[in-house]
Image (spheres, grey):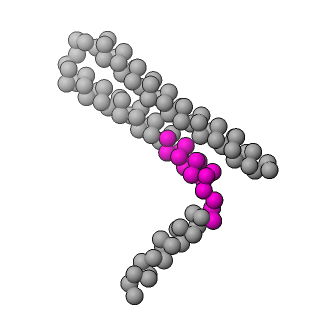
């Protein structure tokens, strides 16, 4: 009973929170890059574009790391460990049966 409560409410809320943090990271990076782009009009356009790509890319990668963590937590919550263990064992022994 308590395990189901923790599983459905606390972990599900943490997945939603981590997904929300990921969205906020992308929005913050985009807004900061846009403001910087507007303020640096006098710089070389090629240099400015390279900086924007690098800056936005770093925020997108950080956001993706948060999304991966949320997906891992969600996978652990929704799939029983017995099913995952059976799947891993079938993958590890499958090549042995194909050889013979």
Quick check: 33 left or right of 42? Answer: right
Nearer the observer, 91 or 66? 91
Quick check: 38 left or right of 83? Answer: left
Q: Quadrant of residue 37?
A: top left
State how many labels appear. Answer: 0
Q: Please identify the dominant SS of the magenta region.
A: helix
Image vertical order of residue 5 relative to residue 58, above or below: below
Measured as percent of width and height from the top left, residue 90 is found at 51, 73
Q: Residue furthest bottom?
A: 100
Residue displayed at 66% across by 43% down: 11
Nearer the observer, 7 or 53? 7
Nearer the observer, 12 or 53? 12
Measured as percent of width and height from the top left, residue 29 is found at 41, 25
State which region is magenta: 67-82
Tell me, yes or no, whether the highlighted magenta stretch contains residue 72: yes
Residue displayed at 36% across by 29% down: 56
Image vertical order of residue 87 relative to residue 77, above or below: below
Measured as percent of width and height from the top left, residue 38 is found at 31, 13
Nearer the observer, 59 or 22? 22
Tell me, yes or no, whether the highlighted magenta stretch contains residue 95: no
Residue displayed at 53% across by 67% down: 87
For the C terminus, give its image quadrant: bottom left
Measured as percent of width and height from the top left, residue 48 is found at 25, 22
């Amino acid at each position: 009973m308590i395990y189901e409560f923790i599983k459905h409410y606390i972990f599900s809320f943490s997945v939603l929170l981590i997904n929300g943090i990921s969205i906020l990271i992308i929005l913050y990076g985009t807004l900061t890059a846009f403001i910087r782009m507007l303020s640096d009009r006098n710089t070389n356009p090629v240099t400015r574009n390279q900086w924007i790509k690098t800056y936005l890319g770093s925020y997108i990668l950080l956001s993706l790391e948060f999304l991966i963590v949320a997906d891992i937590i969600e996978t652990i919550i929704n799939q029983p460990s017995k099913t995952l263990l059976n799947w891993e064992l079938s993958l590890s022994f499958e090549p042995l049966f194909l050889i013979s």
